[in-house]
């Protein structure tokens, strides 16, 4: 990636305003036609959102889009869409015992509504606030209960694949445990054993850092210093013995290449946890036998490694990434890192959703590191600048998506290839749209000298 000039958040303000105008219109149009019986909107096909019966992990993003747009536009229709749908349709996600997605669905709805009330953007209401906080407490505890123990005190929140499976995606969802912890909640186990949600968060982060991220330390033949930050989608364990068996992937090309959305989840997840843990008192760590400085160092190490990999070898020159750094036909693109990404090529798709997630991670890491993080911050602004323009910004009224050229599951062939094209292109995903809006809200706040996090309100 080449950052050829310095940018400021204020410079991107007109593009952010344009984005929220387009997104608000599209969000209202989808809400007007969508029926819950259709499942959750997941990806577009020929510009129109459709469901996919795998899990309903994008339902919260659909309603969260409306809430984020309301934050900027103050259009009451958008608040109505977000709040009423959260009340009517999100309860099952609070108690869902079969997924690792709690931080996706519930922080994008209950969490965002709570933040709006904390910030005075929507009127204070004690019962409504208690409702949002009860949802977040319960969700954090249910997520923490989806646990696989490993030897020597390690463990992880296992994916929907089963108790053997550790997904890197969960580093973005585990923050729900952090929110529940700050609300004073714990998980009660057998014989009323109190289980710290902060401890579960930290243990999961440690395990993911050890087994899903490579630091050039020789863990396998490809764990070389020049590939520091390589990230694997899934780590597989023997759930009976707790023994690590192998790296794996569900959505990437291979276990030894880097699926870029998984990389982006790690970038953002560790950067956010670094921000979050820095705000907690030392006593919170002492209570669970942890050291705050050590926890912060682990988060920073993982965030730096993954962000460095993205900047140095995970993207094209404009900061936009392809779906997997080692996909089968990447070699046919030639020296692809030396020029801007080409979403219309004939060989391998771009994944703009990964870039939107990664940009937020770069900005957050850059900010929390201060002067030492300026290169990350500027890289995040450069990626955002590219995404806020065509061909990535969806400006056509007929297309329901906000961010174009997103990829869902390339190995399974779940992405739409338009007539005349050889690979999927020109489509959107609900998580891509949501994270583009989150990124843009962050840019908006930064441009005003403010900030935005999952755990605190301005």
Image: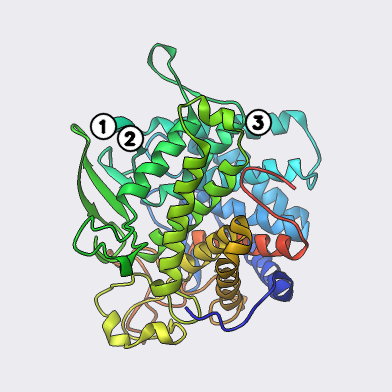
Dot 1 crowding, Cα within 10 Å, few <14, some 14–19, many 20+: few
Secondary-structure class at tag 1: helix
Which residue is at the front of the view, 141 or 409? 141
Q: How is the image coloured?
A: rainbow
**Mark nearer the viewer, 3 or 2:** 2
Is residue 395 in view?
yes
Are the two marked residues, 3 and 2, in contact with CB atoms closer than 8 angstroms?
no
Q: Quadrant of residue 192?
A: top left
What SS does tag 2 mark? loop
Residue drawn at 24 percent across, 60 percent down: 255
Q: Position of residue 143 (x, y in %)?
A: 44, 35
Classify 10 Å Cα crowding around label 3: few (below 14), some (14-19), many (20 and above): some
User: Measuring 78% from the left and 62% from the top, which residue is drawn there?
Assistant: 448
Picture quarter containing residue 260?
bottom left
Closer to the chain start, of discs 3 and 1, is: 3
- Residue under label 3, please give it: 131
Q: Tell me if residue 188 comes above or below residue 261 in the rendering.
A: above
Cα–Cα gap, marks 3 and 2: 33 Å
Q: Quadrant of residue 408?
A: bottom left
Residue 424, x across and y down, in percent: 37, 76
Label 2 crowd (10 A; few <14 / some 14-19 / many >=20): some
Residue 32 visible in rendering: no
Circles 1, 2 touching at the beta carbon (< 8 Å): yes
Q: Position of 159 compared to 372: left or right?
A: left
| Residue located 48% across and 71% down the image | 352
Q: Earlier in the sequence, mark 3 or mark 2?
A: 3
State the separation of the CA atoms marked 3 and 1: 38 Å
Check the image and report above or below for 403 versus 277. below
Q: Secondary structure at mark 3?
A: helix
- The label shown at residue 154 is 2
Q: In this view of the protein, which residue sits in the foreground, 41 or 431?
A: 431
């Amino acid at each position: 990636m080449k950052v050829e000039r310095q940018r400021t958040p204020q410079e991107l303000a007109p593009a952010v305003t344009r984005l929220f105008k387009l997104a608000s219109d599209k969000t209202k149009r989808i809400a007007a036609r969508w029926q819950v019986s259709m499942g959750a909107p997941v990806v577009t096909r020929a510009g129109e959102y459709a469901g996919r019966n795998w899990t309903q992990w994008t339902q919260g993003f659909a309603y969260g889009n409306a809430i984020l747009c309301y934050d900027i536009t103050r259009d009451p229709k958008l608040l109505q869409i977000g709040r009423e749908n959260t009340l009517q349709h999100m309860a099952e996600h609070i108690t869902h015992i079969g997924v690792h997605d709690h931080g996706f669905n519930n922080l994008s709805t209950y969490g965002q509504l709570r933040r709006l009330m904390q910030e005075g953007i929507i009127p204070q209401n004690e019962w409504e606030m208690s409702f949002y906080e009860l949802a977040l407490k319960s969700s954090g505890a249910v997520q923490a209960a989806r646990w696989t123990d490993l030897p020597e005190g390690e463990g992880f929140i296992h994916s929907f694949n089963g108790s053997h499976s550790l997904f890197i995606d969960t580093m973005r969802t585990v923050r729900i445990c952090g929110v529940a912890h700050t609300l004073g909640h714990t998980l009660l186990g057998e014989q009323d054993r109190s289980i710290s949600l902060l401890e579960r968060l930290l243990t999961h982060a440690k395990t993911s850092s050890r087994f899903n991220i490579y630091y050039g330390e020789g863990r396998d033949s490809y764990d070389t210093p020049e590939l520091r930050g390589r990230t694997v989608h899934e780590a597989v364990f023997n759930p009976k013995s707790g023994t690590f068996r192998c790296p794996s992937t569900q959505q990437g090309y291979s276990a030894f290449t880097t699926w870029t959305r998984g990389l982006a989840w790690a970038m953002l997840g560790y950067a956010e946890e670094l921000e979050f843990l820095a705000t907690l008192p030392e006593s919170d760590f002492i209570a669970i036998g942890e050291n705050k400085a050590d926890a912060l160092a682990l988060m920073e190490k993982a965030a730096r490694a993954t962000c460095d990999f993205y900047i140095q070898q995970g993207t094209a020159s404009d900061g936009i990434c392809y779906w997997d750094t080692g996909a089968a036909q990447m070699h046919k693109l030639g020296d692809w890192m030396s020029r801007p990404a080409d979403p219309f090529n004939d060989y391998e798709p771009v994944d703009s959703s990964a870039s939107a997630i990664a940009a937020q991670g770069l900005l957050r890491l850059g900010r929390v590191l201060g002067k030492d993080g300026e290169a990350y911050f500027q890289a995040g602004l450069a990626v955002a600048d590219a995404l806020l323009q065509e061909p990535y910004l969806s400006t056509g009224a007929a297309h329901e998506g906000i961010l174009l050229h997103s990829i869902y599951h390339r190995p399974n062939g779940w992405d739409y290839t338009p007539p005349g094209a050889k690979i999927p292109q020109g489509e959107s995903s609900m998580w891509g749209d949501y994270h583009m809006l989150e990124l843009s809200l962050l840019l908006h706040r930064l441009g005003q000298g403010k900030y935005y996090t999952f755990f605190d309100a301005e």
